Image: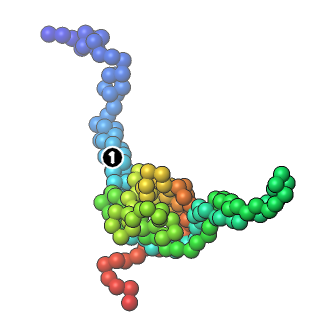
Amino acid sequence: MATTETLNSRRPASADFFDAITPLERKNNMLNRNQLALLMLCPSLALAQSLTLSCDGQGTVMATQSTTVNQYDFKHKENKTGIAQTQVRRPFSGNGMVEISSGTGRMRIPDPMIPALMSGDSNGWYPIENLFINDREITGVVHISFLSQPKLRIDRMTGKLSMSGGAGDFSADCSAADVSKPKF
């Protein structure tokens, strides 16, 4: 039969720490672990809630502007006319909708931000990828096309939405919409 001294000599030094903990400290330590586990699960609990937002605001989109250019050709001594195209930012006002349910999100972006060759998954809705939700903000990337993936951020304290990247940007004030019953 081994003595206590021989058992202690086989243990690592860190084992002495666990022997020094009283049963009350062990119980408190288990409570802290349970609280930590609950805190780690809170973001997924927040994802489980359904949320629909209506967002009214303004933005800008990239557009091509054509201009007629008159130029004098000194070599041939005549006026020449041509067309010059430049990229400009065109302002717009619009409405967007955000739906979050079961940890996934989608957004109906304002019409001016929809690329000419895109139609969305159904009725103009686009998926929100890399969705992150906490009590202060909602962030993600709206996947419109492989070229247009604007970043989305909604401040839950102020209701401000900002979306930028791709072919334009959009800023709006959001409010919760209850889609389960008619507004009037």
Is 80 left, or right, of 52 in this rendering? right
Closest to the observer, 75 or 42 = 75
- Image point (64%, 64%), residue name: 65
What colour scheme was applied to this rendering of the protein? rainbow
Extreme residue toward the front, this view: 76
| Vertical placement of residue 36 versus 7, above or below | below
Q: Give percent across and percent down for residue 20.
A: 34, 27
- Image point (36%, 70%), residue name: 123
- Image point (21%, 11%), residue name: 3
| Vertical placement of residue 80 versus 95, above or below | above
Location of residue 59 (image quadrant): bottom right
For label 1, the residue is: 37
Q: How many marks?
A: 1
Is 70 left, or right, of 12 in this rendering? right
Q: From the image, which quarter does the N terminus lie in?
A: top left
Q: Give percent across and percent down for residue 100.
A: 36, 63
Can residue 178 be spotted in the picture? Answer: yes
- Image point (34%, 77%), residue name: 179
Extreme residue toward the left, this view: 1
Q: Provide the secondary structure element on which disc 1 rests.
A: helix
Q: Mark 1: which amino acid?
A: Ala
Extreme residue toward the bottom, this view: 184
Is 105 left, or right, of 168 in this rendering? left
Q: Give percent across and percent down for residue 184.
A: 38, 90
Question: Within 10 angstroms of label 1, few (less than 14), some, or many (20 or more) residues?
Answer: few
